[in-house]
Image (cartoon, grey):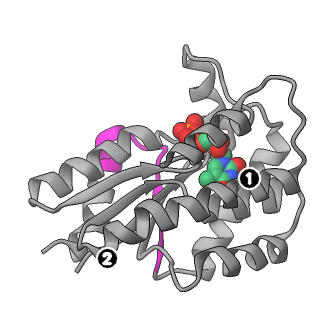
Amino acid sequence: MSYFITIEGTDGAGKSTQLNWVADMLTDKNIEFVVTREPGGTVLGESLRELILSREKISITPLSQLLLMFAARAQHIQEVIQPALDSGKWVVCDRFTDASYAYQGAAGGLGMDVVSAIESLVHGELQPDLTILLDVSVEIGEARIAKRSESSDRFEKLETEKKKKIRKTYLDRCLLYPDRIKRIDASKDISGVKTQIEQILEPLLP
Ligand code: TYD
């Protein structure tokens, strides 16, 4: 049985570090898997990513953002995700459609129904089996981002009110899909977060 796992988090939650651990845990169990990310994961997706995340003066309306995210996603599903799952590999994806609900639906003001309509078109039956949500308060996330040396992307620059909407949407979706989306308190120390991830993955492992 292969599983499709997505990892989401509010900005500054430490998603990249935790994603590496998920990969390490699967490697330890000799599970074949593909690690990928959104927006991205294909040649088209990575070029769209550059365009979408750049902070240069390209104006992109929330609806255009959403359509670009889903254009990248359509290619990603068809070219990478579905073939990997079909061949028995697990897929670990750094962000997926829950991010479109949070960033474009909520922060961008498009509303959930617009995202849902495009989701039905692009996903078909596909949904992640497990979504790990790394959750920290907006205040802690911002403090962590401020300490980083690299420059922040278009979305990390969002004002605090929008970041609060993003977090709220993730938490609301957790309540809507409690079997799929598991929240992890990412304000804890790194090893505490790792332990929580191990507990969540355990039931899926052979
Ligand atoms: P990511 O690489 O996860 O950035 P970080 O590791 O710094 O959190 O994601 C890039 C950004 O793209 C992130 O700020 C969220 C945004 N995004 C959307 O706005 N909509 C989407 O559908 C996806 C997948 C990502």
Q: Is residue 81 left or right of residue 47?
A: left
Provide residue 104's location: percent of width, then percent of height. 79, 56
> Residue at position x 52%, y 59% from top?
76
Corner quadrant of residue 96: bottom right
**Quarter of the image containing the C terminus?**
bottom left
Q: How many marks?
A: 2
Local secondary structure at mark 1: helix
Q: Which mark is residue 19?
A: none
> Residue at position x 53%, y 86% from top?
125
Height in image: 159 above or below 146? below
Provide residue 46's location: percent of width, then percent of height. 56, 40
Neighbour tally class for label 1: few under 14, some 14-19, many 20 plus, Cα within 10 Å: some
Height in image: 112 above or below 164? below
Provide residue 134's location: percent of width, then percent of height. 49, 53
Q: Is residue 167 visible?
A: no
Counting residues from the start of the chain, the first of labels 2 and 1 encountered is: 1
Q: Is mark 1 within 8 Å of ligand 1?
A: no
Local secondary structure at mark 2: helix
Q: Is residue 153 visible?
A: yes
> Residue at position x 37%, y 38% from top?
17
Q: Nearer the viewer, residue 99 or 47?
A: 47
Magenta stretch bounds: 180-194
- Is residue 186 in the magenta section? yes
The image quadrant where one finds ligand 1 is top right
Q: Which mark is residue 68?
A: 1
Q: Is residue 94 left or right of residue 163?
A: left
Return the residue at label 2.
Answer: 86
